[in-house]
């Protein structure tokens, strides 16, 4: 499944408190730390080799037995960390010049690397907290998708194809791999239990316009729906359940729309078996950019006062007026009005044009 990818940014988790994870392009913190560790070890090895190759120019005042490779490594370590016990020292002039013009810059580079890493870690934590705060402050009228499995990904893909902005979609999932997948698809995400009120608050669910719940268990879906409805009375809540017997419980919990996945799949399979063409048409309606598509849109000014049958290539199935759904056979001679919404079937934008038969 291909999901549009906006320009990535950074991502982060806070310490102890979940922060939003935004799409990112940069390498992980572990890779950056490993890179800097290898660089530090490289500096240490370079300094060790410099001392060992020129070991005759150094004196070991503690052992008086010459400078071995272990002594060179020891000298490089205490020199780079600015400890400087003084038991091994350069005694010849050229060795001292090498310490001034070569060893000292290496020591400074190591300190800059060490201090820079520490400062960057602290700065990143502050930037992550600031980024999380800015994201929460600007997030409202968005869509929260709880569960980023196959159903959740399909729902988001449909939203994005219908014109929704990826930066107005937030994913919540307990699986860190699902959260990482959401980030790769250009979506902000939280890792955690969606029944936790604090996590839902951090996802700005009380300001959300729509909530889609696609968790794997019906009991979890019921509890999640109850929690969501307590935090947001006005959002449109769509819930996916497996067993149709749980539909009344989901509706009583506050869901506006309930989709029974097992019944929907079973009905499609039954229709395809009894009438292959009918099953093909229904599957066509559910498949994006293929043949027919079904959509809901606003009535335009040019369509004000026209009959539903006069919309050209679009076939009106229903009209939504004052939040009331009126099917095509309930319309009679009513004309469309500005402010209405129509549910139509039309040719998908990506479908090939069929030549007209004369």
Image (cartoon, helix red, strand yellow):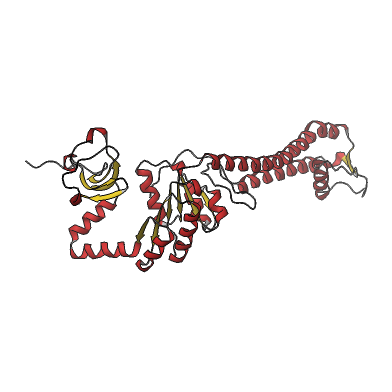
Horizontal side, residue 10 vs residue 333: left or right: right
The answer to which image quadrant residue 338 occupies is: top left
- Of 265 and 62, the residue lying toward us: 265
The residue sitting at 19% across, 37% down in the picture is: 306
Horizontal side, residue 196 vs residue 252: left or right: right
Horizontal side, residue 234 vs residue 112: left or right: left
Residue 289 seen: no
Horizontal side, residue 171 vs residue 301: left or right: right
Q: Position of residue 278 (x, y in %)?
A: 19, 58
Q: Position of residue 130 (x, y in %)?
A: 61, 40
- Of 314 and 302, the residue lying toward us: 302
The answer to which image quadrant residue 238 occupies is: bottom left
In the displayed structure, 219 sits above or below 133; it is below
The residue sitting at 29% across, 52% down in the picture is: 286
Q: Position of residue 11 (x, y in %)?
A: 56, 44
Q: Position of residue 336 (x, y in %)?
A: 22, 40
In the displayed structure, 19 sits above or below 115; it is below
Residue 270 seen: yes
Outermost left residue: 358
The answer to which image quadrant residue 310 occupies is: top left
In the displayed structure, 6 sits above or below 234; it is above
- Of 91 and 174, the residue lying toward us: 174
């Amino acid at each position: 499944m291909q999901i549009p990818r906006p320009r990535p940014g950074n991502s982060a988790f806070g310490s102890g408190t979940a922060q939003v994870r935004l799409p990112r392009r940069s390498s992980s913190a572990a890779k950056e730390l490993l890179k800097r560790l290898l660089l530090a070890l490289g500096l240490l090895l370079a300094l060790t080799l410099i001392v060992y190759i020129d070991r005759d120019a150094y004196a070991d005042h503690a052992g008086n037995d010459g400078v071995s490779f272990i002594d060179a490594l020891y000298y490089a370590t205490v020199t780079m960390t600015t400890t400087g016990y003084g038991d091994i020292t350069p005694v010849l002039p050229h060795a001292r010049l090498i310490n001034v013009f070569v060893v000292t810059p290496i020591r400074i580079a190591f300190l800059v690397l060490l201090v820079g890493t520490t400062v960057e870690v602290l700065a990143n934590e502050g930037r992550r907290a600031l980024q999380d705060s800015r994201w929460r402050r600007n997030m409202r009228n968005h869509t929260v998708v709880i569960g980023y499995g196959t159903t959740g990904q399909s729902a988001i893909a449909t939203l994005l194809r219908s014109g929704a902005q990826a930066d107005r979609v937030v994913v919540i999932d307990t699986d860190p791999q699902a959260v990482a997948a959401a980030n790769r698809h250009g979506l902000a995400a939280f890792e955690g239990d969606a029944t936790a009120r604090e996590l839902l608050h951090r996802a700005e669910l009380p300001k959300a316009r729509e909530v889609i719940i696609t968790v794997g268990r019906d009991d979890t879906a019921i509890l999640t729906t109850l929690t969501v409805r307590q935090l947001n009375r006005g959002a449109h809540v769509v819930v996916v359940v497996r067993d149709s017997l749980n539909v009344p419980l989901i509706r009583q919990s506050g869901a506006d729309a309930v989709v029974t996945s097992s019944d929907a799949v079973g009905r499609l399979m039954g229709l395809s078996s009894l009438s292959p063409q009918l099953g093909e048409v229904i599957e066509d309606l559910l498949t994006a950019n293929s043949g027919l598509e079904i959509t809901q849109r606003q009535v335009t000014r040019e369509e004000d006062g026209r009959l539903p049958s006069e919309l050209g290539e679009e076939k009106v199935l229903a009209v939504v007026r004052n939040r009331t759904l009126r099917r095509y056979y309930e319309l009679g001679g009513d004309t469309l009005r500005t402010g209405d919404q129509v549910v139509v079937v039309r040719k998908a934008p990506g479908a090939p044009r069929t030549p007209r038969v004369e």
